[in-house]
Amino acid sequence: MKQFFITATDTDAGKTFVSCALIKALIETSTKTTRQSSVQALIRPETGDKNICATKPTKVAAFKPIAAGCELVDGQLINEDAKLLSEFSNCGQSITDINPIAYAEPIAPHIAAKKQNQQINVADINHHYQAVKSLNADVTLVEGAGGWRIPLGPSSLAPLSAEAMSLNINTANSTSNNKSNSPNDKLTVDTQKPAYQFLSDFVKGAELEVILIVNMKLGCLNHALLTYETIIADGLKCIAWIANCAASEPMNNLAENIAELELLLPMPKIAQFDYFNDVDSEGNEISFHEKINLAAQQINLAPLVK
Ligand SMILES: Nc1ncnc2c1ncn2[C@@H]1O[C@H](COP(=O)(O)OP(=O)(O)O)[C@@H](O)[C@H]1O
Ligand SMILES: [Mg+2]
């Protein structure tokens, strides 16, 4: 089974848009005999029989472990990303199977959890992920939340000890008063801070292969490189990147920025999406599904199924 984690330079970068297009491409490609041999045989090398592949579309499961920004529908928190992922994937998952941890407010998920005196942790995410894995999909696509280093919150709900609190306060004072601020002081204080968990800890534990979506806007070179370097420093594989124009107004020098990223990022660029307008040249409305169809056709899947 292939397991991909979709991360991005930021929120609203196009993770959901690209995830839907990727799912569509993976499923469509497997049902088209012309390209099926290269993609399907690599996804299911164990079959060794390309004719069997031709009759079986690729099974793609989706997972959006945490989401903040949901609508309450019939007593259930429904996240739009999870809804879209459920429309494109083909393993019969419910929206809650896809998105088990959901909060209504569109804010940082761990802050939304904290406001309800809850805690998001890697163990819970792993638990839900096991259910997704049990579907035995050919490909499982996991959409992150925000950017790469999104916090889940402290490892435990225990409040800071009085000693730790006083150390933190003293440090704040000493910094603002410009008193002693040696590296040793900092080390002492840092050990008193609660250990944090991050969504990236789940990605590490599950050994997902990462695909980076770069939202092509001013600042994207820095964001893309920092994100890539951090993924690698976390010991993970970043197997591909996609240049995505998530805003209707294209950035200045788009081509030059893409060329720079192609030089600086070692992994292959598997797609380059312009902004898909809501209407065509004749003024006809283009639906989300039509946009995804168009985007799916532009993805080079080969580096993903190596
Ligand atoms: N290339 C694109 N063309 C048109 N709309 C896009 C494109 N990429 C993203 N969008 C739209 O931009 C918004 C933010 O994208 P989304 O995929 O939800 O970002 P993320 O999942 O990273 O938060 C959504 O409304 C999405 O449909
Ligand atoms: Mg999203």
Image: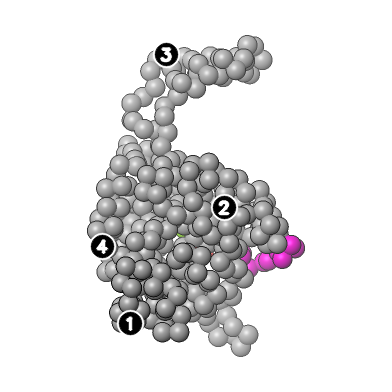
* Distance from the alpha carbon under mark 1 to that under mark 4: 23 Å
30, 83: nearer the viewer? 30
Residue 171 x, y percent position in the rendering:
55, 17
Q: Does the segment drawn in magenta span residue 100?
A: no
Going by the numbered disc 3, the residue's amino acid type is Glu
SS assignment at label 2: loop
Report the residue marked by disc 1. Answer: 51
Numbered mark located on residue 9 in the image: 2
Look at the image and tell me whether residue 296 can be seen. Answer: yes
Q: Nearest to the eye among marks 3 and 2: give it.
A: 2
Q: Please tell me in which quadrant of the rendered image residue 243 appears.
A: bottom right
Going by the numbered disc 2, the residue's amino acid type is Thr
Report the residue marked by disc 3. Answer: 163
Q: Are marks 3 and 2 in contact (CB under 8 Å)?
A: no
- Residue 259, placed above or below residue 124: below
State which tag comes first along the sequence, 3 or 1.
1
State which tag comes first along the sequence, 4 or 3.
4
Total residue callouts: 4
State which tag comes first along the sequence, 2 or 4.
2
234, 247: nearer the viewer? 234
Residue 77 x, y percent position in the rendering:
32, 56
Q: Residue at x 63, y 68 (%)?
A: 248
SS assignment at label 1: helix
Going by the numbered disc 4, the residue's amino acid type is Leu
Numbered mark located on residue 135 in the image: 4
User: Which stretch did the figure color magenta?
Assistant: 244-256
Q: Nearest to the eye among marks 3 and 1: give it.
A: 1
Q: Does the segment drawn in magenta span residue 250?
A: yes
Q: Residue at x 42, y 79 (%)?
A: 36
